[in-house]
Amino acid sequence: MSIEIRVGPAQLAIHQGHAVLLSEPDGQIQWPSDKGLYFYDTRMISSWSIYANGERWELLNGGATTSFAERIFLVNRALVTEAGPVAARTIGLVLSRHIGGGVHEDIDLTNYGSSKVRFNFEIAVRSDFADIFEVKSGHFVRRGNITTEWDRKHQRLTTAYRNGDFSREVVMRALDGDAPAGYANGRITFDVELAPSATWHTCLAYDLLDGKTCYPAPESCMNQAADQSKNHKRLAAWREAVLKVETSNDQFRNLYQQAIDDMFALRLPIPGTRPDQMQLVAAAGLPWFVALFGRDSLVVSIQTSLVYSDFARGTLDALGALQATARDDYRDAEPGKIMHELRLGELAKLKLIPHTPYYGTADATPLYLIALHDAWCCTGDRELLTRHLPTAGRCLEWIDKYGDSDGDGFQEYATRSSAGLENQSWKDSGEALVYPDGTLVKGPKALCELQGYVYDAWLRMAQIYDVLDDAGRAAALRAKAATLFDRFNAVFWDEDSGFYAFALDGDKNPVWSVTSNPGHCLWSGIVPPERAARVVARLMQPDMWSGWGIRTLSANHAAYNPFSYQKGAVWPHDNGLIAHGFKRYGYSAEAARIAFDVCEAGRFFRLNQLPELYAGLHRDDANFPVQYPGANVPQAWAAGAVFSLLQAILGLQPDAPHEMLYIDPDLPPWLGDLTLRDLRVGEQIFDIRFWRAGEQTNFGVLKGNPAAVVRRDMTVWRDLLKHEVKDASAPAG
């Protein structure tokens, strides 16, 4: 049975930097809804509708042409005018928009009838300047004042919001129109007169202001800007710079290319340690998470380490600049902690939310250390290590002093903030952590994957200290890692079930709910090899394996809900890391199974975009994945899951410090050939072809030094990471 279904919300979204335009499929913004033009966490336009003599327009079709541009085709309904009736579908309307700072909008009308028409074209526009947190929650409080001013001479409508020293403005400018604009009663109006076959055009430029800083709209029309705009040039440069994939498997190729484009679309300029130099960091996702996140940005840095290593450079710098220096209970901050989330809207400005930044994450700090080591393995950049070593040292101090607040040897967390997150791992929704009976886990909570992250971070930092000739510090970290390894496996393991507790509760009792969390323990290496088979087998049981990926919570659990956020849904990034963990322990077939089924899910989603999550429903021949309502699309680490799956299949182990690339390829039957182009490992650039011959995967180096590409079992990493880097090097990621 063949199903041709495209899953996803009925909406259009384009974005660039901090600006996001989210509309209905016809390009309009209906009130009330969560749609709008967002800028720096503020909804600048909350309603936008178009009319012809008071009548709405009918949608034919529309869509995004790139992440930053869209085009929509509409036609008129039947009109009554002074000159007589106008039949439906006589007038064609094309809306074209592109974002570059602000938004440029082209309005093109064509008369396809046999008689001259004259009508009033209206744009009804409204701005509520709601904070994005309030839009998402559905509860909005107006705190400041809105003013509107129409400048007829300059054809300019200025709508401003001010609350003390917080201000936002949107300036709508009518440009190059075939008729002047008027304004009254919240509507910009044009008198349109069209002879048969005649066309009519006008532009609207939406300039966006954050305080006194203006982000002007592009001046050129979309047709004129094609292939010449800054965004098009940046996209072309991005596609040239990243790792490229060729394969006869159309679905994997399409999924990979869309992931590449999604990563470009989510690039966000963030100040780093040098105020005059902006860093490009992956925003977490659209529309709700167009902001700097700690955990998300670091995971994406690891996922993209061989695709585009500059993400890691930018992320390490930006997060290092915002590392906490003092205790602040409202923001859940302690010295050395890496932040969770930075917001720039009114609520943050007024400190009505703690996101200035907010530090309520238990895992971003060890993930920073993992990402640093990972970037070094991929780039061989010793200066990267020395530049970020002070930040890394403070991270290590935080892990010891604050991560393990009760001194029992395990990492645990609990919020101190009145507005903080109850759960501070990647499963951070309030309902995510449950006992087997479905009740909420009492804290402080010590999650299994947190122990794995710290274990991995300590071993990786030991290698870094080896490189920097600090053998004493390296030895101490390896000793601590060995102790944690033993204690974790004594306390968290259940021999009868062959699985790990996903957490210890506030009384240090293991929580035996079956979740995806132990899969991350495989990724981090804290699982003994002799136990790995049982962990893999448990994750692939039908209650965990949906057929579209591994669920966050067992379908046999009392709290299971496939449509929930983190109690049974499937998260692509979760599956990507687990697949990578499977590969690290030698379970290539199981890793490939995850890759296949996640890719199969991907073909149902619009544009082949993997969403943040989708329902954990059981797969069958007449079923398809169901997107979670409100899931972010694109989502950075969902797109990055494709790169994790690629690394799992090929067993890529970069060792740039020693000018080597180790590989452990095992192409599955559904992916019989794969070629990597422009794979950068340090200063070397490789083109490598992989192909399946019977049960064997062969490879050939098409560009670069063939002697630098060596087959090595992925499981070797476990031993190498425990030794001095001068003797051997460990794989990244």
Image (cartoon, grey):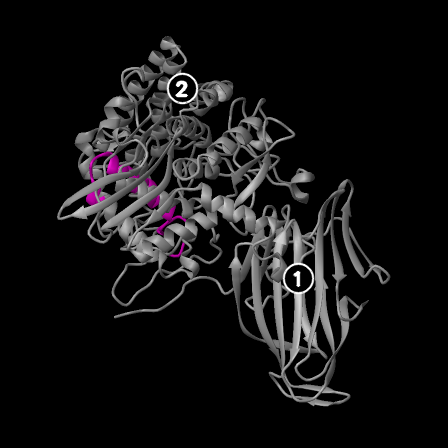
Residue 96 percent across, percent down from the top left: 61, 64
Residue beneath disc 1:
105
Residue 652 percent across, percent down from the top left: 29, 36
| Secondary element at tag 1 | strand
Residue 455 in view, yes or no: yes
Dot 1 amino acid type: Glu
Residue 414 percent across, percent down from the top left: 47, 32
Residue beneath disc 2:
407
Residue at (66% x, 89% y) in the render:
114
Left or right of 436? Residue 495 is left
Residue at (76% x, 68% y) in the render:
187
Provide the residue span drawn in magenta. Answer: 563-590
Q: Is residue 39 magenta?
A: no
| Upstream in sequence: badge 1 or badge 2 | 1
Left or right of 190? Residue 667 is left
| Secondary element at tag 2 | loop
Q: For the N terminus, which image quadrant?
A: bottom left
Left or right of 124? Residue 326 is left
Q: For the C terminus, which image quadrant?
A: top left
Dot 2 amino acid type: Gly
Query: Marks 1 and 2, how far apart in space?
Result: 59 Å
> Which of the 4 image quarters holds residue 677?
top left
Q: Is residue 565 magenta?
A: yes
Up-down relation of residue 662 to residue 49 (above or below): above
Q: Residue furthest left?
A: 694
